[in-house]
Image (spheres, helix red, strand yellow):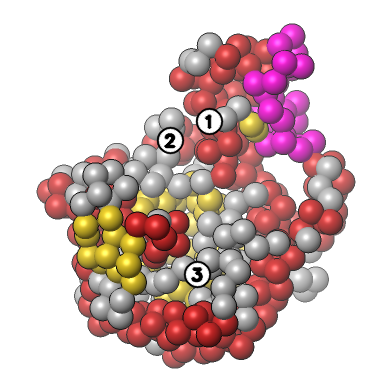
Amino acid sequence: MDAVTYELIKKSTETDARLGILHTPHGDIETPVFMPVGTQASVKTMTPEELKEIGAKIILSNTYHLYIRPGERIIEKAGGLHKFMHWDRAILTDSGGYQVFSLSNLRDIKEEGVTFKSHLDGSKHFFTPEKAVQIQNSLGADIIMCFDECLPYPCDKDYASLALKRTIRWAKRCKDTHKNIEKQSLFGIIQGGMYKDLRLQSVNEMTDMDFPGYSIGGLSIGEPKKIMYEVLDWITPVMPQNKPRYLMGVGSPDCLIEGAIRGIDMFDCVLPTRIARNGTVFTSHGKLVVRNAPYAEDFRPLDEECDCYACRNYSRAYIRHLFKANEILAARLATYHNIYFLVNLMKKIRKSIKGGTLLKLRDEFYLKYGYNKEDDE
């Protein structure tokens, strides 16, 4: 039996949204779910206890970065990633495929694999599909990813087709290598750029390999949101109903709602932690740049409708002061709030799917948040 399984609880009658439970070796997770990112085996500025307090049930770490530093062997000697980072809930690891895109000036792609130049010291490292799986086996995450090629946007169709065929061949090699099926589940990744026929080809060939779950890669890489939603409209209706669907690298509030409407079960993104460190927070009425001058004497919480630790105890004026004074607590409080905001939004999304009011939630959220659909263009 697969280590990770998906239980469909309810399908929406008004949209393609669905409620489910992701069963993992480290606990059950209600879906749709947002997963905070801990690239270096740490969600930046947060302790595991704080993440639990917020309600996070699963977090991400990155295979490439942990391979570079400290090295998978050290983590394996520590007893695996869960023990190494003091996190007893579920973990998902990316394969390094995103770095094929993000480190495009530091890598060389061939059929056998990808040669990376370390972003730390320039040393060369050769990643094959087999090696990506073996590293993830050593790390011990509950959910691991096939090694793939994440394409840039825009991308020529001829190259997108070649890259897709290679990604499919790599997926077969990953599946042949993965042996730890009772403790870890290997997800296939759907690619194909922004081309409908290639995306549908990817769905067909990946599902023929019968992975326990499927990730949707190559989106949120610079394309207009309208195009991303169009790609999801093509592929989610033909994806298996009994397997989880994971939209990689997507985490803005509007995208979480729109993705859930289209039947996505799992999301992740560095957005809430990254913007928090720069002094920006999500609120019920849109983003707020708390480090800006207008908040110097604003003694209200970050969001008057939020009951997170930061909002219960600290004012905008105080948090702005911390940012201006370069105090680490500023980033911690802003990050706590942003992760709480998205985790709480997912609770509202799940409740609205259960009650058949997801479209109402979307409309009300957009009106209050000040979101303009023209921004999707």
User: Residue 308: percent from the left, percent from the top?
Assistant: 61, 29
Q: Is residue 307 above or below residue 101?
A: above
Residue of label 3: 151
Name the mark on residue 44: 2
Q: Is residue 293 above or below residue 38?
A: above
- Residue range corresponding to the magenta coloring: 282-309
- Labelled pair 1, 2 in contact (Cβ < 8 Å): yes
Residue at x 42% of width, y 39% of height: 43
- Give the foreground label among 2 and 3: 3
Snapshot quadrant of residue 197? bottom right
Report how far apart the C-alphas of labels 1 and 2 lie in the structure: 9 Å
Q: Is residue 151 visible?
A: yes
Asked if the magenta segment contains residue 289, the reply would be yes
Residue at x 28% of width, y 55% of height: 117
User: Residue 342: percent from the left, percent from the top?
Assistant: 62, 44
Report how far apart the C-alphas of labels 2 and 3 lie in the structure: 27 Å
Name the mark on residue 277: 1
- Labelled pair 1, 3 in contact (Cβ < 8 Å): no
Give the mark count. Answer: 3
Q: Is residue 26 visible?
A: no
